[in-house]
Image (cartoon, rainbow, N blue to C red):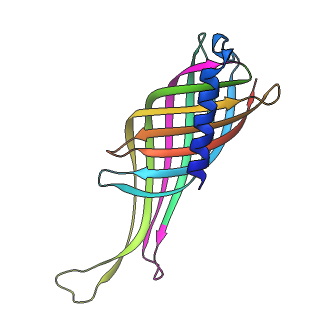
Amino acid sequence: MPLSWFTRLLAGSISTCLLSPALLCEPPKRPEIIGHYGALRYGADEGWDGSSAAYGGTVTIPFARRWAVEADLATGQQVDFDSQGFGRRTRRIIVSGHIQYRRGTERAYWFVGFGPGLQYKSNSGRHLVQQSSDPEPVVRHFSSTGNEFAPIGYKTGVVVNPTRSLLIRGEVLMQHAYILPNAMFRIGVGWRF
């Protein structure tokens, strides 16, 4: 399962960074852009609301010795239809900004970040509705859109730099728009300028 592989990679990378003398060095001072792909689990007030693949991008701009500001965009589409064609299609777009604390070197560092975000949600589908005046159920089509403020978001991960500018990044991101968060587990490839 990708989650256990990713969790082991993340734990191993963080412990390697913590045990190495590289902690005395500074993380990179150049901007980074990352494209990422992974899994997104949707949170809601009533419980988990499904999962899907997710993709997006991140831009990180350092502003102090171990601090950076980061803009993040992720999207995923959940499709949940039964064999008769009833169900829904939900697209979520999550935009967030984070203040990031980083430790490590130019070659590898780990980070933790926090900050607010927005979630755009679009639903469409069809379902059966039983009306009291009609003995036969009626098929109803629906669609809705909306924006939701996601006030609490946090992330942690590791960035490895195998060549001068190429980056590989693994991270876990949680963004709360409901009681349960939207949880993303993703791997990214990027470039340091």
Instruction: Identify the main secondary structure in magenta.
Output: strand
* Residue located 58% across and 33% down the image: 157
* Left or right side of 39 for 148: left
Residue 30 vs 2, above or below: the answer is above
Residue 81 part of the magenta-drawn span: yes
Q: Residue furthest bottom?
A: 135
Q: Quadrant of residue 153?
A: top left
* Left or right side of 132 for 153: right
Residue 131 vs 50, above or below: the answer is below
Quadrant location, the N terminus:
bottom right
Quadrant location, the C terminus:
top right
Horizontal and vertical percent position of residue 172? 53, 39
Residue 179 part of the magenta-drawn span: no
Horizontal and vertical percent position of residue 152? 39, 33
Horizontal and vertical percent position of residue 66? 59, 14
* Residue located 17% across and 84% down the image: 133
Q: Quadrant of residue 159?
A: top right
* Residue located 69% across and 26% down the image: 32
Start and end of the magenta stretch?
80-105
Q: Residue furthest right?
A: 163
* Left or right side of 35 for 120: left
* Residue located 21% across and 87% down the image: 134
| Residue 60 in sight in this render | no
